[in-house]
Image: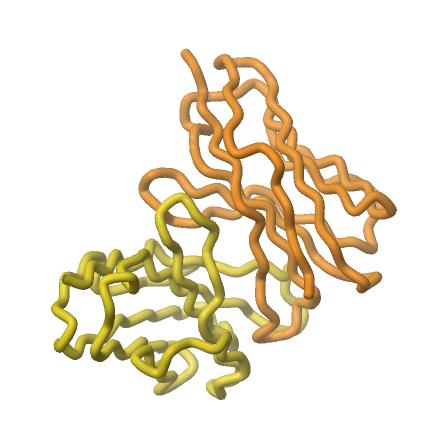
Chain colours: A orange, B yellow
Amino acid sequence: AQTVTQSQPEMSVQEAETVTLSCTYDTSESDYYLFWYKQPPSRQMILVIRQEAYKQQNATENRFSVNFQKAAKSFSLKISDSQLGDAAMYFCAYRRSKAAGNKLTFGGGTRVLVKP
Amino acid sequence: DTEVTQTPKHLVMGMTNKKSLKCEQHMGHRAMYWYKQKAKKPPELMFVYSYEKLSINESVPSRFSPECPNSSLLNLHLHALQPEDSALYLCASSQGQGDTGELFFGEGSRLTVL
């Protein structure tokens, strides 16, 4: 079974600074999909960024970027120029396939606190 | 329309009640999911419907009964629940083949069992 591990329960960052969240996963598949979701207190899961394992290039979305190390099974998220609105719970997630009905498995989450 | 709509947002029920949670999407997605999330924990998968057929049941107790009347609707029927079933219930959908792989989530239904 696939497992996703986030080793940092909580991270604190000063506004406008950079923070990096760690994620490791375990899989025997060669092709899969990785995601970072954000869950603010409003509780809706919002997709932050996605990475397809067959793509070597790291994904970026505005202030969010990932460092995808396939051999090491590592998928970290970097938040640059942190803003107060970035404060939330961040979940790393793994999906084996895009096929309909294939499940998404979450890591334990990292709470990000942003200090003004 | 990129929304997954869940109703009700909050539900309080007794252990002998029967209630239902409802989820709706109009994105043409062919897979729908129920996740359960306890406080400060990640979501845990309960059920998956793929093309309106139940494809995954993660050994969920029978007091939870899912139903997928059509490709846009997903219900979760609740009966004889226990206080430990109190949680946030998240519905999600995904397109299937040819999509970007992500799941789209609703805002959730906060359930309290007294």
**Corner quadrant of residue B37:** bottom left
Q: Is residue A2 above or below residue B74?
A: above
For the C terminus of chain B, give its image quadrant.
bottom left
Residue A89 % position (x, y): 46, 38
Q: Residue at x 39, y 62 (%)?
A: B36
Q: Residue at x 52, y 36 (%)?
A: A110
Depth check: give the residue in front, B99 or A101.
A101
**Corner quadrant of residue A7:** top right
Residue A42 % position (x, y): 32, 42
Q: Is residue B53 above or below residue A94?
A: below
Q: Is residue B54 above or below residue A78?
A: below
Q: Residue at x 84, y 61 (%)?
A: A30
Position of B83 compared to A40: left or right?
left
Residue A115 % position (x, y): 43, 14
Position of A43 compared to B81: left or right?
right
For the N terminus of chain B, give its image quadrant.
bottom left
Depth check: give the residue in front, B64 or B84.
B84
Number of marks present in the image shown: 0
Depth check: give the residue in front, B2 or A91.
A91
Residue A36 % position (x, y): 59, 44
Q: Residue at x 70, y 57 (%)?
A: A33
Depth check: give the residue in front, A44 or A3.
A3
